């Protein structure tokens, strides 16, 4: 992982299970881990405020760690969470959408009306995912043809869409 946007330069633990993280691309986010800590068994040790306060940059800036080689979170996941909490569309949504649809990069780029290279930028978090691209992904899902190799020929009407998705 040598991409600047996923390399952490500094981390500062804050009250209420929050972190301020600065990345090598000079972007800084404040994010809350409260929900992850509350719902993830693996992160439950971080309920201890003293342990949470020990957050530090992991090896090569690839993570935030609390206990070396035992308790850490990867930089790409933290950045995705921070983008989502800030109201953006995280790159992991694109990665998951590609996986769930089974589309190749070329098929997905064609479906979204963008270049393959731009889709890779979005998938890899190198460029912010525009809201209209995520909406296009959702739209593709709604009009998804039965044969995944085909693109929808036309967008169904509201009534046709409702009829398709009933049951």
Image (spheres, rainbow, N blue to C red):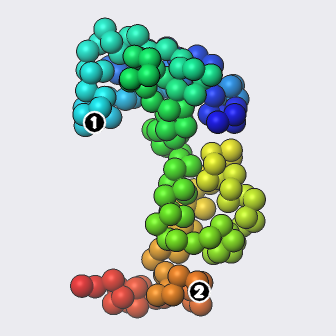
108 or 90: nearer the viewer: 108
- Residue drawn at (58%, 83%) of the image: 149
- On the rendered image, what quadrant is the N terminus found in? top right
- Residue drawn at (40%, 91%) of the image: 160
**On the image, numbered disc 1 is attached to which residue?**
40
129, above or below 61, in the image: below
How many labels, in total? 2
- On the rendered image, what quadrant is the C terminus found in? bottom left
101, above or below 11, in the image: below
Q: Position of residue 133 (x, y in %)?
A: 60, 62
**On the image, numbered disc 2 is attached to which residue?**
150
17, above or below 165, in the image: above
Residue 25 in sight: yes
Q: Is residue 98 left or right of residue 7?
A: left
Residue 128 in sight: no
Q: Position of residue 107 (x, y in %)?
A: 65, 74
Q: Is residue 127 left or right of residue 153?
A: right
Q: Position of residue 20 (x, y in %)?
A: 50, 20
**For the residues marked 2 and 1, what is the alpha-carbon distance in whole angstroms?**
39 Å
Residue 97 numbered tag: none
């Amino acid at each position: 992982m040598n991409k600047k946007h996923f390399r952490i330069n500094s981390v500062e633990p804050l009250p209420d299970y929050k972190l301020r993280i600065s990345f090598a691309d000079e972007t800084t986010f404040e994010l809350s881990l409260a929900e992850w800590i509350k719902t993830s068994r693996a992160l439950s040790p971080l309920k201890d405020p003293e342990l949470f306060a020990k957050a530090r940059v992991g090896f090569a800036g690839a993570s935030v760690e609390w206990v070396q080689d035992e308790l850490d979170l990867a930089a790409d996941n933290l950045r995705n969470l921070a983008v989502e909490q800030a109201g953006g569309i995280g790159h992991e949504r694109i990665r998951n959408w590609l996986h769930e649809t089974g589309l190749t990069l070329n098929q997905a780029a064609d479906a979204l009306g963008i270049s393959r290279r731009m889709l890779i930028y979005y998938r890899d978090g190198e460029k912010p995912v525009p809201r209209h691209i995520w909406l296009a992904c959702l739209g593709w899902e709604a009009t998804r043809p039965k044969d995944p190799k085909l693109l929808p020929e036309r967008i169904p009407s509201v009534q046709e869409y409702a009829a398709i998705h009933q049951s």
